[in-house]
Image (spheres, rainbow, N blue to C red):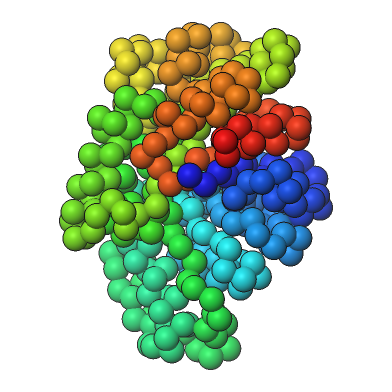
Amino acid sequence: MLLDSALIVQDLAKAGDAARALEDAGFDGGFTFEGPHDPFFPLALAARDTSRLELGTAVAIAFARNPMIVAQLAWDLQALSRGRFSLGLGSQIRAHIERRFGQPWSRPAARMREFVLALRAIWAAWQERRALDFRGEFYVHTLMTPFFDPGPLDCALPRVFVAGVGPRMTEVAGEVADGFIVHPFHTPEFVRDQTLPALDRGLARAGRSRDQLEIACQVMVAVGRNREELANARAAVRGQIAFYGSTPAYRGVLERHGWEALQPELNALAKRGAWPEMAQRVSDEMVEAIAVAGTPGEVAAKLSARCGFAQRVALVTPYGVDPTVLRELVRSLRR
């Protein structure tokens, strides 16, 4: 099982140092995500300052961009990292796409499927020197002149991962992606009963098997060596669970455990900006079901038991973690 960690920095100039720290701590990969900063920029610095660490976005919002822009970003990062980059894509929700990014929203699963196919057509034009002629329902790419062609890579093409919570997007990942990212807002029961069956349906549609797809399971982790560290970590994770739980598209996870009445409450509080009150609505039972909490050794054991279906485990820690705690957690997982 490969172990990844979020690459989080407030000062973008320190992204290379942060990536090197993850590499030195023994992590296999570091990933960025769409947040206060662009997810691609820090990876350029990380690629420059590391030699072994695999790098990726988990995730970049596909519908905030178009396939040509994303194809070029991924191409350049793959070249810069000498083959260590993976492109993780997510859809976001309608409100963010339309009101934050000012982009169109329609049939997200079908659009994501076409987005990935368009990426592959663009990359094939560059790598195999073939004519670019992609004509889809949402995207059309039919023009590529030598001036805009970066030329072939001397390493493998970037791998494409798709993240999903709902069944239709999960099926798309199984059908067209190289990997699937399990959203951190999940429980083992939800993954067993809904995520993996949907993934298998998509794989079957493409004539593929589970061993032809890499699964990266993102897990919210509250880790600490003492009571104070663990309490602070649990509080941060509780807030993150409340944020995800307020999203209507993620209601299915709550429904699986009989918590669906909480979703509209959290949504209403989010619209008022009542973030502390939202976190208070998240019970200890929910924290234990959705996240993994404990000392480094306890967290390592829980992750191993929980993520046996995945090839990669990605730690999501929405708080500052002491580097020595991370190193201890990595050592425990390796044992």
Q: Is residue 105 left or right of residue 278?
A: left
Snapshot quadrant of residue 182:
top left
Q: Measuring 58% from the left and 39% from the top, which residue is drawn there?
A: 334
Q: Measuring 45% from the left and 75% from the top, which residue is drawn there?
A: 123
Residue at the extreme front of the image, as rendered? 335
Tell how many labels. Answer: 0
In the rendered view, tell whether residue 67 sits above or below residue 11: below
Q: Is residue 13 left or right of residue 193?
A: right
Q: Is residue 73 left or right of residue 135?
A: right
Snapshot quadrant of residue 277:
top right
Residue 215 seen: yes
Residue 13: give x, y in percent of width and height.
Answer: 81, 52
Residue 229: give x, y in percent of width and height.
Answer: 72, 17
The quadrant the C terminus occupies is: top right
In the rendered view, tell whether residue 306 sits above or below residue 84: above
Residues 152 and 334: in front is: 334
Q: Measuring 64% from the left and 56% from the top, which residue is drawn there?
A: 53
In the rendered view, tell whether residue 159 sits above or below residue 216: below
Q: Is residue 258 left or right of residue 158?
A: left
Residue 141 seen: no
Residue 58: give x, y in percent of width and height.
Answer: 53, 47
Residues 14 and 261: in front is: 14
Residue 273: give x, y in percent of width and height.
Answer: 59, 20
Q: Measuring 46% from the left and 82% from the top, which residue is drawn there?
A: 127
